[in-house]
Image (cartoon, coloured by chain):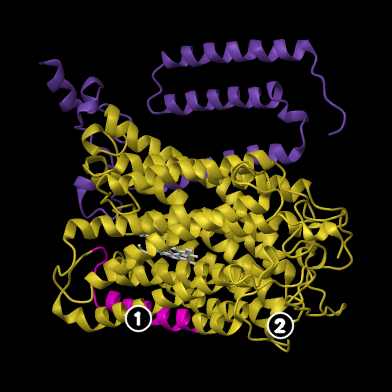
Chain colours: A purple, B yellow
Amino acid sequence: MSEHHITPLKTYLIIAASLLFLSGVTVWVSYIDLGSFNIVLAMFVATVKASLVAFFFMHLLWDDKKNLTMFLMSLMFFGIFVTITMLDTGFRGDLGLNPETKDPINKRAAFYDTLPLTDTHGHPVDEHHEDKDHH
Amino acid sequence: MSENTKQNYLNHPKGIMSWLLTLDHKRIGLMYLFSGILFFFLGGLLALVMRFELAAPGNDIISNEVYNNAYTLHGAIMIFLFIIPAIPGALGNILLPLMVGAKDVAFPRLNLASFYIYSFGALFAMYTIINGGVDTGWTFYTPYSTQSTSNVVPMTLGIFIIGFSSILTGLNFIATVHKMRIPGLTWYKLPLFVWALYGTSLVQITATPVLAITMVLLMLERFLGIGIFDPALGGDPVLYQHFFWFYSHPAVYIMILPAFGIISEIIPVHSRKKIWGYKFIAYSTLSIAFIGFLVWGHHMFTSGQSVFSQIVFSFITYFVGIPTGVKIFSWILTMYKGQVSFTPPMFYALAFLFLFTIGGLTGIFLGAVALDIHLHDTYFVVAHFHYVMQGGTIVAFLGGLHHWWPKSFGVMYNQTIANIAALGVFIGFNGTFFPQFLLGLRGMPRRYATYDEQFVELHSYSTFWSGILGISIFIAVMNLFWSFIKKNKVDPGSNPWGGMTLEWTHTSSPPHPHNFEEEPVLQHGPYDYDQVIVEKTYKK
Ligand code: HEM
Ligand SMILES: [Cu+2]
């Protein structure tokens, strides 16, 4: 803690280059249709970039390990929040009593008018899709 | 006494600016205490208005609309303006640096900033009152909260702002515990109140940002029509409840953990016995803080969430009972074969043990999904959370005030009146809220201004005793403040309960502006009553 870590310029440049490269990756994968996996991939790349910034530019890697612990904890709590919430949204209507409530998201919402409709597994839903083409 | 000890933080420096711009944690704590108690009375007044409306069926005093505003404001004020900020802000601020032997918290300026951020947020909340109120309930559930024409925006904005104050205080306390302890004061020698504040702070900095995000999302939907919670826009209304309770269940531990800490201080001191199971209590604080993050869905058993997650949430909820039970048993075993003295703080601690146990156990009932489907949104839930929040947190807060009053302000209150008021609080509280368990079991729903004939008897009991409860709390608080006015000063060196922690043994009452005249040297652990004899000294 008492001695100050001085990062060589080369490290900064390498990290900057990787950030630019990863930005390119984000743009590039957005052109590939991976279904709902697109968002997972985009979030993953963004997380890697944010971590690089935190570790190198913000010196978390060389800092007191308590600060690193705090950072990892925040990622862990975010993970808990998303995962457990998915236990609900991923299984909504699992009692199967009411098929109407099976899907948490209203696919007839105005928001989806511009997007091809998909079922919960990301496969296109045909009847609706065709409806739209013939408009 | 040297000239130096006549100076204390209350009389030095002087002048209103020296208070408004103070960086002294004790003065900031005092400002939190006054504002907290002010809001406590405001919230309490609203509660009494509701109770009198409910004394008989029908709309006798206020209309349905006014009733909706009254319970929303009561809940929001009590939770966001009083309970959450007041214990860490008031008792935590005054005591934490004293207990670790420090001159102040780690970031004194940030501490003052927290207080002003809190006041600024409170202004927004108060604005809603003069502007016609809010009627969504303190939980702001969608879709109603995105449609209601009442003051949802100023209120949520106020809560958003107060959240930052909470985060900054948490950060400050964590840094203080890590960095400001005197040499030799290792983790296991810390008073348990410090552990409790540490656990609370961790929850504050990890959970509160989610509340802030929730409030932002609510406004994004209201103003920009971005579909997050509204199904017509492609959102999911139940998602709001996930967001809200991901903060608000941990928030109930922000409310109760400091209370646990207070009880862990009061019981050994007033039983003159080493605390039983120090490490158990310390670690149960951390495990409650952690498990508290995994159970939020037990507030949503009737929201239409998946059965799979209901089972998971119900199962994990039971685990909260384990560390909580560990604490209760440790406190009881601490009293066993001790020299229990029935001082006002001890009265409150005993009341806490009764009331919190009832509150916690009924929480486990509600955590059972099959039972909760029937009890959700009934008076059973209302009774449960008042037993934990008022019977637990507020009773512990009153106990803590009575315990540290002579230390913090150098004056002693009338102990007989304090004991009578404490008894009044205990009886009045049970009289008010126990009938509500029965009401809930018989199907009385919460948040209604009127009800069926069959509930009259229990409701009128509850109203009657709520009057006694209100009067008792008023007497208890006035008795404390009266000691100021009467200038019933204690000797600066006095240790009326025989405490062993640094704030009792190494500084005067009220403390010196810089806490300690010289850096204290630790001579014993916080509860070493088995090794060291401490004199109770109480001189006027
Ligand atoms: C022993 C641990 C506890 C358990 C297992 C527990 C369980 C529960 C459950 C299952 C509910 C939902 C009931 C329903 O809405 O149907 C609930 C509500 C509530 N609990 Fe607890 N609880 C515990 C301790 C606490 C503590 C310590 C506090 C606060 C200091 C607290 C405050 C609340 C509040 C405010 C509500 C009602 C929220 C609302 O809907 O307005 N609980 N509790
Ligand atoms: Cu809860």
Q: Quadrant of the C terminus of chain A?
A: top left
Q: Nearer the viewer, mark 2 or mark 1?
A: 1
Residue that badge 1 annotates:
B465
In the shown orientation, is residue B39 left or right of residue B237?
right
Name the spot of residue A13 as percent of width and height, x first: 71, 10
Name the spot of residue B501 as percent of width and height, x first: 78, 67
Amino acid at pointer 1: Trp
Query: Magenta stretch?
Result: B423-447
Magenta stretch: helix, strand or loop mostly = helix
Establish whether labels 2 and 1 are both on one chain.
Answer: yes
Q: Chain of mark 1?
A: B
Residue that badge 2 annotates:
B271
B56 lies above or below B246: below
Quarter where residue A134 is shown? top left
Q: Earlier in the sequence, mark 2 or mark 1?
A: 2
Residue at x 51% of width, y 41% of height: B117
Q: Nearer the viewer, residue B432 or A54?
A: B432
Q: Quadrant of the N terminus of chain A?
A: top right
Q: Is residue B4 magenta?
A: no
Amino acid at pointer 2: Ser
Residue at x 47% of width, y 73% of height: B391
Tag 1's secondary structure?
helix
Tag 2's secondary structure?
helix
Q: Quadrant of ligand 1?
A: bottom left
Residue at x 61% of width, y 50% of height: B28
Q: Which mark is residue B17?
A: none
Near mark 1 (Cα within 10 A), the count class, few <14, some 14-19 or many ≥20, is many
